Image (tube, rainbow, N blue to C red):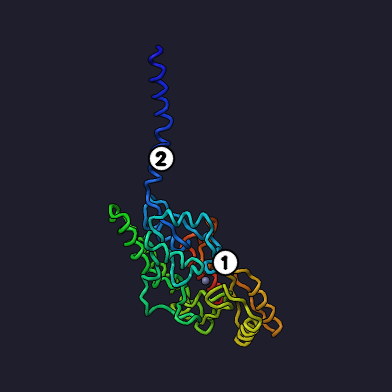
Amino acid sequence: MKKIVPVIITFLFFILFLPFFFRTTQKKNSLYVVCTTSIIADAVHAITDGQMRIKTLMGPGVDPHIYRPRESDVQALSEADLIFYNGLHLEGKMADMFAHMSDRISTCAVADAIPNNSYIESEFEGLYDPHVWHDVTLWSNTVLYIRDALIALDPERTQIYVCNAQNYLDQLTALQRWVEKKIAQIPKSKRELLTAHDAFTYFGRAYGFEVIGLQGISTDAVVSTRGIQSMADHIARKKIKAIFLESSIPSKSIEAVQKAVASRGWHVAIAPELYSDSLGDKSTTASTYCGMIMHNVDVIVDSLS
Ligand SMILES: [Zn+2]
């Protein structure tokens, strides 16, 4: 009997702790991918199959232009096997960090997948507007680029990534057709999109809107009284029906425009918020890329047509 007790204890130890040990080892061995924005992470989640650990640094409502990495972000980035970021200086405060890391960790700026002659120039000399995801066809270019970076990291699962990327591309093609059909409901003369910052220039070019942002490409700049007055003049003169809030920008400046328009004898409505630089949280229909575009287009069509 005395000899049996240690055997039973050893047996129990293995039964109780082996699954834990196995899980920990498996977690440690699984590939780790870090994405800066939720928009990029949506594509990475769609192309992978749940076998990788994927972390998104900037959650819903986070403004990437002024985002400063936290200590936990720096830790995650240093442990990553692959980092996806937008590029074109969207992640203003992190650009230098990625440049320093690129000799040790694989980094992939997804905007590099877009033909350079499709970039829109920004108000900063020599720099381009980073908000490329608001043109669905243009954004589709990033899917195969992300797929190929994942295949280079994990060639054993090539077939899965190829198949999932194709499914995601098919969704984007259907989305593009849906957007074109919806936008056709707005008369061409009414296609004016006035927002808190200049995030919708690619959207405007793709779908025939004149776009005016109160703040310019980056939210780092200060909104001037002159800017508010000039936007109010434009709205009152053209009798524009609605202006738009953005999920990652405070509403104060848009409310100031509404007041300035009222003093000119015209009422402009403040439309529900658009998702400009991040997806919505899980409780909203905008928590995926397709859902976010559909939400924005629905709001724009309802408010302007
Ligand atoms: Zn932006």
Relative to residue 198, is residue 1 depicted above or below? above
Q: Which residue is mark 1?
A: 248
Q: CA distance from mark 1 to mark 2?
A: 37 Å
Residues 281 and 40: in front is 40
Secondary structure under the numbered disc 1 in the rendered image = loop
Query: On the picture, is 51 further left or further right than 300?
Result: left
For the N terminus, the image quarter is: top left
Q: Please identify, in this view, whether the residue under mark 1 or under mark 2 is nearer the observer.
A: 2
**Amino acid of disc 1:** Ser
The answer to the question of whether label 1 and label 2 lie on touching residues, with beta carbons closer than 8 A, is no
Residue 41's x, y, as percent? 44, 60
Residue at (31, 62) in percent of width and height: 148
Residue 230's x, y, as percent? 62, 85
Q: Earlier in the sequence, mark 1 or mark 2?
A: 2
**Does mark 1 have its CB less than 8 Å from ligand 1?**
yes
Residue 154's x, y, as percent? 31, 54
Mark 2 crowd level (few <14, some 14–19, many ≥20, 10 Å Cα): few
Secondary structure under the numbered disc 2 in the rendered image = helix
Q: Which residue is mark 2?
A: 23
